[in-house]
Image (cartoon, rainbow, N blue to C red):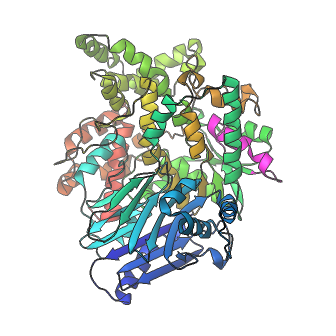
Amino acid sequence: MCGIVGSWQATDCSLDALRAPVLRMTQALHHRGPDGQGVWFDSAVGMALGHRRLAIQDLSDAGQQPMLSASGRFVIIYNGEVYNAPALRMELEKIGQHISWRGHSDTETMLACIEAWGIEESVKHFIGMFAFALWDRQEHQLHLVRDRLGIKPLYYGFQGETLLFGSELKALRAHPAFQGRINRDALALFFRHNVIPTPYSIYQGIQKLQPGTILTFTNPSTKPKISTFWDAWAIAESGQTNMFLGSYQEAVNELERLLSDAVKLRMLSDVPLGAFLSGGIDSSTVVAWTPRQSAHPIRSFSLAFSETEYNEAPHAAILAQHLGTDHTELLVTSDQALEVIPRLPTIFDEPFADSSQIPTFLVSQLTRQHVTVALSGDGGDELFCGYNRYLWAGPLWNKLGRLPKVARTGLSYGLQVLSVEQWNQLYRMTERVIPSRLRMQAPGRNAHRLAEILAFNDERAFYRGIVSHWDESPVLGAQEPVTRLTATRQPDCHSFTEWMMAQDLVTYLPDDILTKVDRASMAVALEARVPLLDHRVVEFAWSLPLEWKLRQQTGKQILRDVLYKHVPRHLIERPKMGFGIPLDRWLRHDLRDWAEDLLDERKMTQQGYLNPTPIRLKWKEHLSGKRNWQYHLWDVLMWQAWLQQTHGEF
């Protein structure tokens, strides 16, 4: 795992003119790669490449980057891991590629594959997570490549006559050509989704590379050619067309085989390795296979919270004991969590407002004190129907969609008669008679959220309402651009539930979940690996019928049945918990002064980006306890904090 940067200038430039900027860019990513730095230049064509190294495989100098291929034709800078590199070396030998290997790094293997098969064929062979830039010295072509699911980040864009690219925006900002004009339209998307979705970034002229694509430049000032080597939407559609033909038990066995191999591949490391263990199904599934792959107990890590509604630590500890891991738990105090908040704009690098970013960083920080690589359970919800909205959104719309608009309006009004806290009190009084699978963490918030989305006229707009924060954007002078959620082309799915899953696979997963894990882990130089997002697991999951995932209002059924072979059912069966924090309470108390300063009406007016009126109204209602606007307000606060820290506004 590393950080990559580069620039390509259309005009002639000296070596010195290339060196200083790329060194600044590279240094900006020191946190992603504290083990070494490398740069490479070709002043004749204006190309500069930089790399920060976090040494995971082949700790010797033979793993240093930028790395030239054996023939000298290709130069690569690369962030990620290709886990099947040893198998690829054997495959190259079989086809007569007798290579004198310099070391055993996956980077060298990738270059050998590209020389043998070409770039498009090679990336189809790679099993792993990767974002890389490949310079073809013979053809004078630059290829930017991002892995299938978007696990690793890659930004790029033209600033004047200079093409900039890198793992994070802070590296691009370090280049003198960087202009830094705020993209108000992207900012409007941020206030809807609490992230800035691909392909947009917070800056004009800078984009995120779409997952599963290769971008090829033949000149730094001309439009690139884009090719897709793997498309998650196409995989979802293909899986539903070409369904798995075996029995349910055969599917369980095949999923177990795929998961076992995915975990085995991701345990390849020359440095200490551990795992996040929350006690939920996904992380438990990943950890359950580690004893077979290691001669020693793997280390596992979890957070504990004093607030019982957020605390999964007791479950994680019991599972750790059952699975035989060497378990470490950190009790998080409010002071520890609050200390992280001033660092968030730097860690996440562009506005990002999923508040679980805080515990994600804390568990990464804890883990890095003991190991350099951690396995994570991300991806299970999107693949195996795990989010609560998959359970209720489809059935609810089937009922609501038949109601006249006036009836839905009346129901919306009725839901808002009780305050959030009154709904919570009513829920606590009746919780014992509610089936465990239907219990929820925030009934009051959910009731009021439902009231907001009752006005939608079709199921896709209904879903968009479910996943939206600010329906009416407070951004001044902005118009939301098209996203994959609003595009005319949509995945062809058998059901509304599967359509939601496909949407989350290409939007929420890469833009929120994987971004959160990448930035939080790499801020402390920890490599996070996600076995459930092995593309072979993804493809197989989409070939399974929905009823094997969602059964009797219980999600992840087939994943549960795989896990039950290794973990007793009673250790797993409990209501789903999010990776959350008591943000609503903190905003009213511990964070109130900090928030009040950032939400100052005069400051927002002077900045000219936001309309302060609806923001101040929500802040007032939140402080009074009348409504819980924690997520809307966190969006504003993360934008304001980012603007202040990154651009010196105020």
Question: In terms of image quadrants, where is residue 307?
Answer: top right
Please report the bounds of the magenta region as a residue range.
Answer: 276-298
Kindly identify the residue that appears in the image at 59 percent across and 29 percent down.
Answer: 244
Question: In terms of image quadrants, where is residue 619?
Answer: top left
Q: Position of residue 160 (x, y in %)?
A: 23, 71
Q: Position of residue 233 (x, y in %)?
A: 43, 39
Q: Is residue 620 magenta?
A: no
Number of numbered markers: 0
Horizontal placement of 527 versus 400: left or right?
Answer: right
* Towards the viewer: 616 or 4: 4
Q: Position of residue 264 (x, y in %)?
A: 71, 50
Asked if one can make out residue 278 in the rendered structure from this viewpoint, the answer is yes
Location of residue 406 with respect to 317 vertically, above or below = above
Kindly identify the residue that appears in the image at 34 percent across and 14 percent down.
Answer: 400
The residue sitting at the left extreme is 477
Asked if one can make out residue 329 in the rendered structure from this viewpoint, the answer is no
Q: Is residue 277 magenta?
A: yes
Q: Position of residue 5 (x, y in %)?
A: 43, 70
Kindly identify the residue that appears in the image at 56 percent across and 23 percent down.
Answer: 550
Location of residue 385 with respect to 268 vertically, above or below = above
* Towards the viewer: 485 or 544: 544
Q: Quadrant of the C terminus?
A: bottom left
* Towards the viewer: 476 or 556: 556
Location of residue 410 with respect to 323 vertically, above or below = above
The residue sitting at the right extreme is 295
* Towards the viewer: 123 or 270: 123
Q: Quadrant of the N terminus?
A: bottom right
Location of residue 475 with respect to 432 vertically, above or below = below
